[in-house]
């Protein structure tokens, strides 16, 4: 191969890589109205609600949101993490909650509602019981916002890479306000 | 006298001697712990004030009231609902002995399950007493049992039916105060205590009620604030506030269908925002080794170090353990955060507490620094304002 084709090939490779990097860094923008719900019924949904208020972002909170609640909604914020007490408070089983979450995400995809998935509970909301909900919610996301303690093993990082989902990992729950303001202007 | 008569008399004397020593030991558990109220305490009463059915019974646990000069909200704090969870009781003791109120009121019951302090749980090898080091000397307190003393309520049924829901639980739970709310005035001893506490929350117009607990490190609901649904916003605000102090808490909603729990029944039947806080107590863990007063103070256990290495522990755990100073500090900082959250939501009826030790102060100085020596002048103590 002569020098000229080598240069062309190099330019193409660099262009492709640059595009990939650009895509990875470009954060999506989410529009209002916003519906905030849980995947796993942890009370982290209340913390997310407090964060949105701090970010001065209006939202409607429905821990047990159903597909019908998506009417008129442009963004679904889903907070992942299992809680047995939360399921007890909601009066539903784990299987019922999983069926609800899957139906809601399917309806969101069909209606073109963008999904912002948050994981705020750190290591306490990881493990066998939580990770099914974490995976389902993360894989359906347009954008992932995760507190570091829940991603020490790159659980969310790996999903973000394999599904090409932009992700922000913050050190603390309270640090999530700034990225929220960036993606929900 | 024949030889076998002499041997029999000797054995009888020895038996009587051991019986006397054991009886004296058991009897010592009925001597109340000494709490030395600080200058912030404006009134002292007992729980029977709220339910005459407890008059003369061993449920007449002390109630301390700290009232500020300015009117405001009322915070009720309960420790010792489970007397084997020492951090709750000691947090209350620190408040009674050291804190003061600028605005509103604090109502503190350090040993809610008074009867549970007169025994320990069988088969647990719990110590009867433990000592908290002060600057000079030490203060000794009783380590109790999870439930009330069977002497006050016996026998346990095979199945405990919660009143009024009819919920069925294991028979032993009939003596567990945190399964007996809201209680009833003519029920079992534990139900009568629960009823009196419920009456106190109502008659004192309590705005925010906090139940302080501890749990085994392998228990999933730990380093946690459990909140009644009406209090979720306050609790979420508290979790964020605590995180800024590098204290990680999870937030849990009080289950609706699990009846008898403080946060559920207080929140349902009174106007109070109801919360329960948990810290990690190695003494309650199933995996622990030697059980001693030292373990209670340090929280360092080699078996739990192994358990932590294989991911069996639900809280951060290393060779520094989970000392009692840390656990009391977490409770006190958690209380500050809940009060901050409440004040933000109710600026028209705020609660202002002063000289409430922070987490950092408890860890660096030790909780003994905030307990009064018997001969000390409590008014000379100082602390950080909230």
Image (cartoon, rainbow, N blue to C red):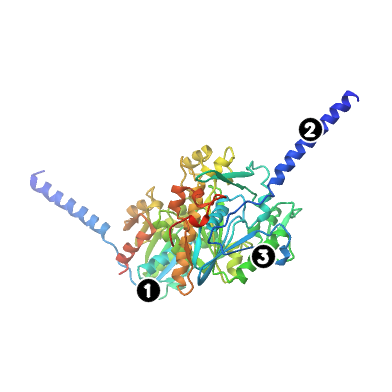
Q: Quadrant of the N terminus of chain A?
A: top left
Q: Nearer the viewer, residue B239 or B199?
A: B199
> Contact, CB < 8 Å: mark 3 with mark 2?
no
Considering depth in this image, is B89 or B42 the residue closer to the camera? B42
Which element carries disc 3, helix, strand or loop? helix
- Report x, y in % for residue B341: 45, 66
Instruction: State which tag comes first along the sequence, 3 or 2.
Output: 2
- Is residue B9 toward the left or the right of residue A3 in the image? right
Would you name the residue on which mark 1 appears?
A33
The answer to whether residue A44 shows anywhere in this view is: no
Q: Residue under circle 3?
A: B196
Label 2 chain ID: B
| Residue B153 higher or lower than B300, as above or below | below
Tell me whether circle 1 and circle 2 mark residues in contact (CB < 8 Å): no
For the residues marked 1 and 3, what is the alpha-carbon distance in whole angstroms?
Answer: 48 Å
- Residues at marks 1 and 2, common chain? no
Q: Residue at x 44, y 69 (%)?
A: B344
Closer to the camera: disc 3 or disc 2?
2
Badge 2: residue crowd in 10 Å (few <14, some 14–19, many ≥20)? few
Classify residue B84 as left or right of residue B363. Answer: right
Is B178 left, or right, of A46 in this rendering? right
- Asked which quadrant contains residue A49, the reply is bottom left
Q: Quick one: SS at disc 1?
A: loop
Please provide percent x and percent y for residue B313. Answer: 50, 45
- Mark 3, other Cα within 10 Å: few <14 / some 14–19 / many ≥20: many
Q: Are marks 1 and 3 in contact (CB under 8 Å)?
A: no
Residue ID for mark 2: B14
Report x, y in % for residue B94.
Answer: 53, 54
Query: In the rendered structure, the residue with mark 3 lies on which chain?
Result: B
């Amino acid at each position: 191969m002569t020098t000229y084709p080598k240069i062309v090939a190099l330019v193409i490779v660099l262009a492709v890589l640059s595009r990939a990097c650009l895509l990875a860094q470009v954060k999506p923008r989410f529009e209002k109205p916003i519906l905030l719900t849980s995947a796993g019924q942890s009370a982290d949904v209340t913390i997310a609600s407090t964060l949105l208020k701090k970010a001065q972002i209006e939202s409607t909170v429905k821990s047990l949101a159903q597909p019908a609640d998506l009417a008129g909604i442009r963004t679904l914020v889903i907070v992942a993490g299992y809680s047995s007490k939360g399921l007890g408070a909601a009066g539903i089983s784990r299987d019922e909650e999983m069926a609800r979450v899957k139906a809601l995400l399917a309806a969101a995809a069909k209606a073109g509602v963008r999904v912002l998935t948050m994981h705020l509970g750190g290591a306490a909301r990881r493990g066998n019981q939580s990770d099914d909900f974490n995976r389902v919610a993360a894989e359906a996301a347009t954008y992932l916002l995760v507190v570091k303690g829940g991603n020490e093993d790159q659980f969310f990082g790996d999903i973000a890479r394999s599904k090409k989902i932009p992700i922000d990992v913050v050190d603390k729950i309270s640090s999530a306000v700034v990225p929220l303001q960036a993606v929900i202007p | 006298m024949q030889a076998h008569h002499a041997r029999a008399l000797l054995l009888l004397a020895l038996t009587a001697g051991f019986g006397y020593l054991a009886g004296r030991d058991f009897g010592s558990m009925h001597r109340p712990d000494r709490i030395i109220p600080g200058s912030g305490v404006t009134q002292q009463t007992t729980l029977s004030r709220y339910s005459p059915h407890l008059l003369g019974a061993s449920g007449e646990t002390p109630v301390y009231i700290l009232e500020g000069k300015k009117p405001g909200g009322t915070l009720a704090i309960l420790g010792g609902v489970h007397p084997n969870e020492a951090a709750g009781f000691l947090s209350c003791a620190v408040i009674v002995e050291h804190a003061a109120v600028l605005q509103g009121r604090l109502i503190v019951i350090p040993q809610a399950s008074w009867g549970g302090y007169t025994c320990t749980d069988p088969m647990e090898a719990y110590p009867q007493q433990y000592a908290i080091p002060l600057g000079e000397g030490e203060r000794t307190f009783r380590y109790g049992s999870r439930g009330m003393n069977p002497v006050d309520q016996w026998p346990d049924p095979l199945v405990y039916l919660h009143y009024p829901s009819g919920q069925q639980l294991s028979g032993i739970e009939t003596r567990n105060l945190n399964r007996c709310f809201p209680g009833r005035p003519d029920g079992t001893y534990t139900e009568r205590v629960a009823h009196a506490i419920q009456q106190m929350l109502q008659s004192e117009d309590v705005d925010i009620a906090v139940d302080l607990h501890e749990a085994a490190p392998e228990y999933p609901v730990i380093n946690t604030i459990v909140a009644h649904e009406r209090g979720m916003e306050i609790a979420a605000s508290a979790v964020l506030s605590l995180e800024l102090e590098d204290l990680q808490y999870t937030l849990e909603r009080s289950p609706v269908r699990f009846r008898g729990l403080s946060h559920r029944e207080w929140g349902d039947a009174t106007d109070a925002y109801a919360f329960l806080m948990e810290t990690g107590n190695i003494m309650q863990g199933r995996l622990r080794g030697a059980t001693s007063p030292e373990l209670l103070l340090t929280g360092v256990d080699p078996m739990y170090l192994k358990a932590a290495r294989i991911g069996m522990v639900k809280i951060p755990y290393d060779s520094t353990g989970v000392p009692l100073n840390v656990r009391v500090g977490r409770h006190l900082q958690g209380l500050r955060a809940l009060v901050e959250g409440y004040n933000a939501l109710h600026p028209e009826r705020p609660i202002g507490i002063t000289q409430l030790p922070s987490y950092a102060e408890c860890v660096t100085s030790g909780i003994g620094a905030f307990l009064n020596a018997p001969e000390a002048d409590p008014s000379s103590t100082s602390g950080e304002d909230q």
